[in-house]
Amino acid sequence: MRNALDRFRQARCQYCGAPAAGGSICGGVPGFSDEKSQFWCERCRLDLIEFSKLPENTLPEAFDISDVEFLEAFNRQMEKRKQREWDYMTQKIVERRGGEEKTGPGETEGNSNTVLFLRTLRSLLPAWKGASLFFVDADSVLKAISSLGIPVKMIPMVEPGQDWDLVSSDFSDEEILKRMFGEKLEKLPNGKLLIVTEACTRFSMEPWLVSHEHFRDFVIHYDIEMFFDGDVVILAPDAHQIVVFHHEGYFAHFDLRNG
Ligand SMILES: [Zn+2]
């Protein structure tokens, strides 16, 4: 692993993609919690402070961790708060750019895979309004697809009655591949594939660009963590398709050809 100083020099704001002004790097505990780095620029930091000061977003200062009902309600509220933060930060970043989707921050580096991915996502799915790669996840993509009037029918990875959280560790990447794309990957879209995995948002890595012929090898040799460890969003611009794997154990293929 690169040292913290090196990582910090190259860091970009996770919200807008501008060079980072501050951040935190937490090494994580193997087998318990993942490494989690967070970086932000000064503008986004100020916007986040403003967001957290809004009455509906203030967090309780202390609570009893044995109060299960409270914790469940709190978890649900945090999910909604995350969604509000997403909307708030997206709007702030778009406003900063003069209200236009010209060159988003994080899109200024020529032909990086980040630029390519965001351009492709916006052209396949204009309803997707995220400001940067940080906002790419299964939920945001599914929300944009459903806003186009396309039915979002997700296929569960496991049989009814099985709990994905309990059985997911029995599934290898190869097994998940087969379930999603068929034994010979016959359902994999043709052409080039632009892919965002959990590592792209967690470690600020560039999206992957792989041609469909090499996809199986790529997934099997992927060794940052499991390929299907968290959400995976696959754009297939040549086939006009998007494939979404949701970390809760379901997936879907979407054909976005007009008409
Ligand atoms: Zn920023």
Image (tube, rainbow, N blue to C red):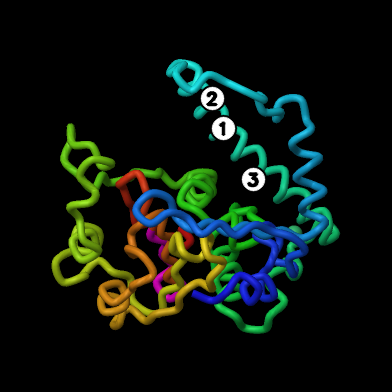
**Magenta-colored span:** 237-243
Question: Gap between marks 2 and 3, in whole Å?
Answer: 18 Å
Left or right of 249 in this view: 193 = right
Cβ–Cβ below 8 Å for labels 2 and 1?
Answer: yes
- Crowding at dot 1, Cα within 10 Å, few <14 / some 14-19 / many 20+, comes out as some
Q: Is residue 138 above or below residue 208?
A: above
Q: Position of residue 60 (x, y in %)?
A: 65, 24
Secondary element at tag 1: helix
Question: Gap between marks 2 and 1, in whole Å?
Answer: 6 Å
Between disc 1 and disc 3, the foreground one is 1
Q: Quadrant of ligand 1?
A: bottom right
- What label does residue 247 carry, if any? none
- Crowding at dot 3, Cα within 10 Å, few <14 / some 14-19 / many 20+, comes out as some
- Crowding at dot 2, Cα within 10 Å, few <14 / some 14-19 / many 20+, comes out as some
Q: Nearer the viewer, residue 254 or 88?
A: 88
Give the mark nearer the N terminus: 1 vs 3.
1
Q: Position of residue 44 (x, y in %)?
A: 77, 53
- What label does residue 74 carry, if any? 2
Q: Nearer the viewer, residue 77 or 2?
A: 2
Secondary element at tag 3: helix
Q: Amino acid at mark 1?
A: Met
| x 59%, y 62%: residue | 133
Q: Which residue is mark 1?
A: 78
Q: Nearer the viewer, residue 97 or 217?
A: 217
| x 65%, y 37%: residue | 84
Q: Which residue is mark 3?
A: 86
